[in-house]
Image (cartoon, grey):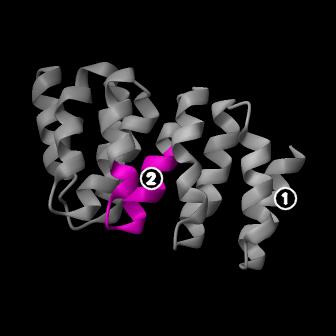
Amino acid sequence: MSVQDQIILNVELLRNPSKDTRKRAAENLAGFGSKSVISLIPLLDDKDWIVRYRAAEALGMIADDRSISPLLACLRDEKDHVRYMSAKSLGEFGIPEIGIALIPLLKDENDYVRKITAASIKKSGSPTATEEIRKALSVERDPAVAEKFREILSE
């Protein structure tokens, strides 16, 4: 089976009812590296949020620059899981400008999104990361999120 055929098969497996199968498919697609990026990017617009989530996950593992803009667009996804994985994946790039683009998600309605966003901003190397996380901490009402912000700030 060719690499392209394996990519196609794993893209189809992202729709499998089994969570473990979908996770393995995303990992397999990431294993193909940049060869699978052009097959994954269109999935960020799929009607099924689970497919969008796993595509964002695989793209983060690959960290190919072609996926930055599409992942940034997913930060506005209606589904919190997709925003979470997009923020997490963008943190893998280690680019300060991405950290700046993530700042609005420090106010996301979902606590998990806020936590991973702070971690990704810190990973980005943004010169304003610490300041932005401190600002978010000063208004954070969820104790678990506030604790995560403090942990990130102490790293």
Q: Is residue 119 above or below residue 65?
A: below
Q: Is residue 51 magenta?
A: no
Residue 114 shows which numbered tag?
Answer: none
- Check disc 2: other Cα within 10 Å, few if <14, some if 14-19, many if 20+: many
Q: Is residue 142 above or below residue 55?
A: below
Residue type at mark 2?
Met
Q: Quadrant of residue 120?
A: top right
Per the rendered image, the range of residues in magenta is 74-88
- Check disc 1: other Cα within 10 Å, few if <14, some if 14-19, many if 20+: some
- Mark 1–mark 2 Cα distance, whole angstroms, equals 21 Å
Q: Quadrant of the C terminus?
A: top right
Residue type at mark 1?
Arg
Comparing 11 with 60, the one in front is 60
Could you say whether the residue bearing mark 2 is in a helix, strand or loop? Answer: helix
Could you say whether the residue bearing mark 1 is in a helix, strand or loop? Answer: helix
Q: Residue furthest right?
A: 154
Horizontal placement of 49 versus 124: left or right? left
Q: Which residue is mark 2?
A: 85
Question: Image point 26% across, 63% down: which residue?
Answer: 49
State the image coordinates of residue 142 (x, y, percent, origin top left). Answer: 71, 78
State the image coordinates of residue 95 (x, y, percent, origin top left). Answer: 57, 26
Q: Which residue is mark 1?
A: 150
